[in-house]
């Protein structure tokens, strides 16, 4: 069964600083990969996804992620964080041809002004 | 284009009661998936509905059941509520039944007392 690990439960960065959120997955093949963001009490908003092709994918709100097959990782990055980016971020995997998303436990991002 | 909507936003039930949660899929999407998100956790897959039939189920007991209607909207029913059922219930819709991006609604916060 696939699994997703987000090793950082909480991260605090200063506004304007760069950000990298880590995600590692365990799966027999290369799954489809997603990053979602959740503001307090809200649903999940899709930031970006990787299905195939270019391993560096661009998303909304200035986020990008890089798929590294050798490391089974799909880390999320942003060059300059804004206070409005404070939220919880979830990495998720979907087997190719599958229907069940498997999520990590999330990383809570705090932005200091 | 209308996104995924869910109702109600919040509700409070007591142990042993039954509850019905509702979801309208994004325009043009024929597949609906339900997830349970306990506090501090990532969402867990409950089941998926496609063409009005259950199409895959996670590790949830039979007292969690669902329906999908001809207009692709869906219901999640939970019988004999337990305290551990307190969670945010998220509905997601997708254009394809397998291997496709899932778009989430705002969720229903269920509290069981």
Image (tube, coloured by chain):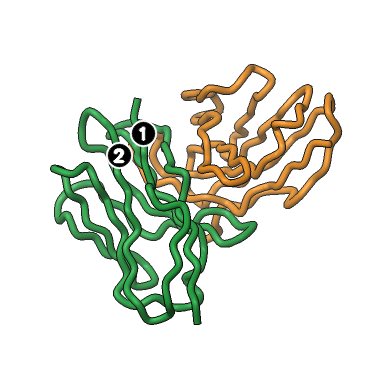
Chain colours: A green, B orange
Secondary structure under tag 2 reads strand
Q: Quadrant of residue B95?
A: top left
Residue highlighted by disc 2: A25
Q: Chain of mark 1?
A: A
Q: Quadrant of residue A103?
A: top left
Q: Are marks 1 and 2 in contact (CB under 8 Å)?
A: yes
B39 on left or right of A77: right
A78 on left or right of B110: left
Which sits in the foreground, A92 or B67?
A: A92
The vertical placement of B74 against B82, above or below, is below
Sort mark 2 into few (<14), some (14-19) or many (20+) by Cα contacts within 10 Å: many
Q: Chain of mark 2?
A: A
Residue highlighted by disc 1: A3
**Residue B86 spot, x, y in % from top left:** 71, 38
Query: How far apart in space, not on screen, are marks 1 and 2 (Cα)?
Result: 6 Å
The vertical placement of B87 against A97, above or below, is below
Which sits in the foreground, A72 or B29?
A: A72
Q: Earlier in the sequence, mark 1 or mark 2?
A: 1
Residue shown at the point (76%, 31%) measured from the top left: B83
Residue shown at the point (83%, 24%) measured from the top left: B16
Residue shown at the point (20%, 31%) measured from the top left: A29
**Residue A51 spot, x, y in % from top left:** 24, 46
Which sits in the foreground, A55 or B68?
A: A55
B73 on left or right of B20: left
**Residue A106 spot, x, y in % from top left:** 46, 49
**Residue A86 spot, x, y in % from top left:** 50, 68
Sort mark 1 into few (<14), some (14-19) or many (20+) by Cα contacts within 10 Å: few
């Amino acid at each position: 069964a696939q699994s997703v690990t987000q090793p950082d439960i909480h991260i605090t960065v200063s506004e304007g600083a760069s950000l990298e959120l880590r995600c590692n997955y365990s799966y027999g093949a290369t799954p489809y990969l997603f990053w979602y963001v959740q503001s307090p009490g809200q649903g999940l908003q899709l930031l970006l996804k990787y299905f195939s092709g270019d391993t560096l994918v661009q998303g909304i709100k200035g986020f990008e992620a890089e798929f590294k097959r050798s490391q089974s990782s799909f880390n999320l990055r942003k060059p300059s964080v804004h206070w409005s980016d404070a939220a919880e971020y979830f990495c998720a995997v979907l087997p190719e041809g599958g229907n069940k998303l498997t999520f990590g436990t999330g990383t809570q991002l705090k932005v200091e002004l | 284009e209308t996104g995924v909507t869910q109702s109600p936003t919040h509700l409070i039930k007591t142990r042993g009661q039954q509850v019905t949660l509702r979801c309208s899929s994004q325009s043009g999407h024929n597949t609906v998936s339900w997830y349970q998100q306990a506090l501090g956790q990532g969402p867990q897959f409950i089941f998926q509905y496609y063409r009005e039939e259950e199409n895959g189920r996670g590790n949830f007991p039979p007292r969690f059941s669902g329906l999908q209607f001809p207009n692709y909207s869906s219901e999640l029913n939970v019988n004999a509520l337990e305290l551990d059922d307190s969670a945010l219930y998220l509905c997601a819709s997708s254009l394809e039944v397998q291997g496709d991006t899932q778009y989430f609604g705002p969720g229903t916060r269920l509290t069981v007392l």
